Image (tube, rainbow, N blue to C red):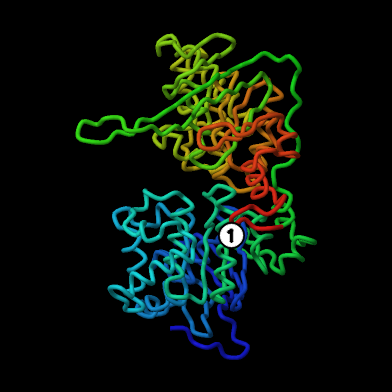
Amino acid sequence: MAVELSENVPLLDIRELSVSFGALPAVKRASLVLERGETLALVGESGSGKSVTALSILQLLPYPHARHPSGSIRLRGQELVGAPPERMREIRGDQIAMVFQEPMSSLNPLHSIEKQIGETLELHKGLRGGRLRARILELLEWVGLPDADRRLQALPHELSGGQRQRVMIAMALANDPDILIADEPTTALDVTIQAQILKLLKDLQTKLGMAILFITHDLGIVRKIADRVCVMKAGEIVESGAVDALFAEARHPYTRQLLAAEPRGEPPPETEGAPEVIAGENLKVWFPLKRGLFGRVADYVKAVDGVSASVREGQTLGVVGESGSGKTTLGLALLRLLASEGAIRFGGARIDGLPGKVLRPLRKGMQIVFQDPFGSLSPRLSVGEIVEEGLLVHGLAGDRPARRERIAQALREVGLDPATQDRYPHEFSGGQRQRIAIARALALQPRLLVLDEPTSALDVSVQAQIVDLLRELQQRYRLAYLFISHDLRVVRALANHLVVMKGGRVVEAGPARQVFERPQHPYTQALLAAALDLDAVNDGAIAT
């Protein structure tokens, strides 16, 4: 139950907070104040201590392994550090609620959304029966979930990413909290959905008068949503202040580095008449939907439906669109990793009808780099073994010393120390792991790289480094890139040509500069508006 604030007592007051895991310090004497009704952004790269600070507020760290060598966390003047468990259970989900980054991991896969939202209302408000159901429907309508009454029994996997995040927000708002902690709530979402979620949070904040602690590594989001900002680096708050003042004149070098970290520059110039590396004509990838006792095909999911695209030597073709638009399916089809209809040419020769044994020697010329480097690198293999795997499959680089030298060369090309080839993926940062994934592809000296969201899981400063690396490698080796992404800021820095996909079809295509400056299709205009702040997006994006 909310308590009225005393005069001059902040809603949330964190002073000199330190957090250690064993002997390892994670947060060092951090201080911040959150007032009622304001949005405070906590900004920094992965590992800076943002989420640890937020979890400390709710006392959700793995105590006693985690401890607080110093500091105080006061909610309306009442100390939370060391508060008894029964007191924290009263606060969590009632006075302070939290929305996590990945809703699929946060929601119970076995329970309906009605049950999951209802749990917190039963616990804190004692609601049952019709009153409980009415409140759940009201919350789902608040967060804009379509057909809320028909979705009460839906399981999390039956909802899209944006819908799951709306359910998480509904759960957090169930008891009208005074503070909402939003931990990277839009990082995994498409740009248009991201804009809708940000606007939703601002609207709900105005409606409910709550304070928001918004954790992010994206300063572009901070500019849209926050009143004040605290910048964290290596567990310390290095700068804080009003958003406008900080963006106008950042004082700390790290803050200036973050502000300058957005991918910039132009893609390498194309060579006129460059040979075509790969092309697909009228490609179709349809997945059958089977129903009934005998599994008859009732319909198809048309993941790619009549798409044509080509990439030339030294050129980057950007493929953009929201999740489910068919981007990744197109890339996998071109690489013959998914069955498809339509002609596919690699190096001018048809490959769509080739059997696997004939196709295998060609695969060293066409490589792919996936979105999540931690998921795509085997944790059981050393870096050297990961890069060596393709060399062994294709019988390249001779004996072991020759292969070791080729591995070392591939690591040097992506900016890694060759001496690290005997270490394992978990010993590297996210950006370093993505460099390893690129090195694995480069070791085979390919002509084509398919890059499937290679920067979306990375901090913004690391994104900029990977973009610079890809441009440098393309210029050096005249590589052809098929760059799949929903982040148009990254695409603008890399792509010469652009294909915009929606529902498995191409809705707009052309030179990248032309599409960015003069988008013709409403869907392209909405994507650009959401990502690049050109204008307001229809149906819920934020006006600039």
| Quadrant in the picture for the N terminus | bottom left
Looking at the picture, how far across and down is residue 129, in whole percent? 28, 73
Look at the picture and state if 172 lies above or below 402. below
Q: Residue at x 38, y 32 (%)?
A: 300
112, 419: nearer the viewer: 112
| Quadrant in the picture for the C terminus | bottom right
Crowd band around label 1 with a 10 angstrom C-alpha radius: few (<14), some (14–19), many (20+)? some
| Amino acid type at image mark 1 | Leu
Which residue is labeled 1 in the image? Answer: 198
Residue 430 falls left or right of residue 145: right
Look at the picture and state if 288 lies above or below 32. above
Q: Residue at x 71, y 29 (%)?
A: 511
Look at the picture and state if 477 lies above or below 205. above
Q: Residue furthest left?
A: 293
Looking at the picture, how far across and down is residue 85, in whole percent? 36, 76
Q: Secondary structure at mark 1?
A: helix
Residue 109 falls left or right of residue 505: left
Looking at the picture, how far across and down is residue 537, in whole percent? 64, 52
461, 335: nearer the viewer: 335
543, 316: nearer the viewer: 543
Looking at the picture, how far across and down is residue 230, in whole percent? 65, 66
Q: Residue at x 54, y 24 (%)?
A: 407
200, 373: nearer the viewer: 200
